[in-house]
Image (cartoon, rainbow, N blue to C red):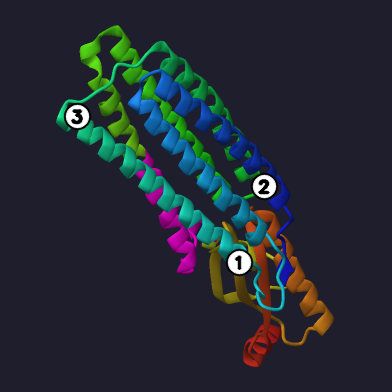
Amino acid sequence: MHNLRSPSAKEGRTVTIAGALVNVALIVLKFGAGILGHSQALIADAVHSVSDLFTDVIVIVGLWMGRKAPDERHHFGHARIETLASSFVGVALIVTALYIGIGASLSIYRHTGSHPTKLALIAALFSIVLKEGLYHYTLRAGRRIKSKLLVANAWHHRSDSLSSVAVVLGVSGALIHPSWHALDSYAALLVSFFIVKVGLDTLRDSLREFTDTAPPSEIVETIRTCAREVPGVLDMHDLRVRTSGGRYQMETHIVVDGRLSVFEGHRIAKAVETCLAEEITDLDRVIVHLDPAPQETMTGDSQN
């Protein structure tokens, strides 16, 4: 067995804690500016930031537990805990989107609106700058440590940024002309659809992991080609691949000359593991089983 998981939870926690501190500051800013600036949209956006803080806590716990090494009770590690946390983030995104979308729809239907001041506009612009910065910071870290959980949380940051864009549009429209206050609601409704899509995509990826769905066919073909090109490998079969915590776990059987020594067969198996580690970027672990080629096959080859 070849285990390739490297410790990376510390970096993920550092990024997420930084995001949580920013979210705390934004919650205070948005609620204060929303009340003083007479902006219902900004107050709703503050509620969105509260959901961001909630998911930050989930991410920190998920990374802490999901990146722990295997133990006596979890022989394959704890990566599925990270997958479970990702699904919670997906649900949080969808719930947040529904909250924004229903509120916007009701405002459009009832023809209700507020008359915000420039204070709400300044606070919303400040939020966009901070949340876009957090999105890129978290996304880069998530891709670097191969964490779908961190990537999902990055999109939660962006959803908050986009909802602030809707606030800017609505507040700007109301400041330009009081009768344009409905722009806020329409923009928020559009953003809610986008957030729902991100949440559903996150849940879909988590479900694929929970059901041990095989990776795309091109990944499987790369694995087969890599193994069969190793000198000494006559064939391969019974390839099984699944994803756990965003990384591939696999096992396969390779066929070698049955007359080889145990040492030589082990060397070939290790060569297959090394090849897969170099070709498959997100490989967690691989188990290679050795099978001897049928004697009649080897006898025929020697006679030829």
Q: Is residue 287 visible?
A: yes
Seen as rendered, the residue at the extreme bottom is: 296
Q: Which residues are magenta?
A: 195-219
Left or right: residue 197 compared with residue 68:
left
Per the model, the C-alpha gap separating discs 3 and 1 is 49 Å
Question: Residue 13 shows which numbered tag?
Answer: 2
Q: Nearer the viewer, mark 3 or mark 1?
A: 3
Is disc 3 placed on a helix, strand or loop? helix
Q: Quadrant of residue 174?
A: top left
Residue underneath mark 3: 108
- Residue 215: % across, % down: 49, 61
Are the residues flagged by discs 2 and 3 in contact, CB closer than 8 Å? no
Left or right: residue 18 compared with residue 165:
right
Question: Residue 249 shows which numbered tag?
Answer: 1
Circle 3 Cα neighbour tier, 10 Å, few/some/many (<14 / 14–19 / ≥20): some
Circle 1 Cα neighbour tier, 10 Å, few/some/many (<14 / 14–19 / ≥20): many
Vertical position of residue 144 compared to residue 208: above or below = above
Residue drawn 44% across the image and 14% down it: 119
Q: Amino acid at mark 2?
A: Arg
Question: Residue 32 shows which numbered tag?
Answer: none
Is disc 2 placed on a helix, strand or loop? helix
Residue drawn 53% across the image and 63% down it: 220
Residue 229 located within the stretch drawn in magenta: no
Residue drawn 41% across the image and 44% down it: 198
Vertical position of residue 207 compared to residue 281: above or below = below
**Of callouts 2 and 3, which one flags the residue occurring earlier in the amino acid sequence?**
2
**Of callouts 3 and 1, which one flags the residue occurring earlier in the amino acid sequence?**
3
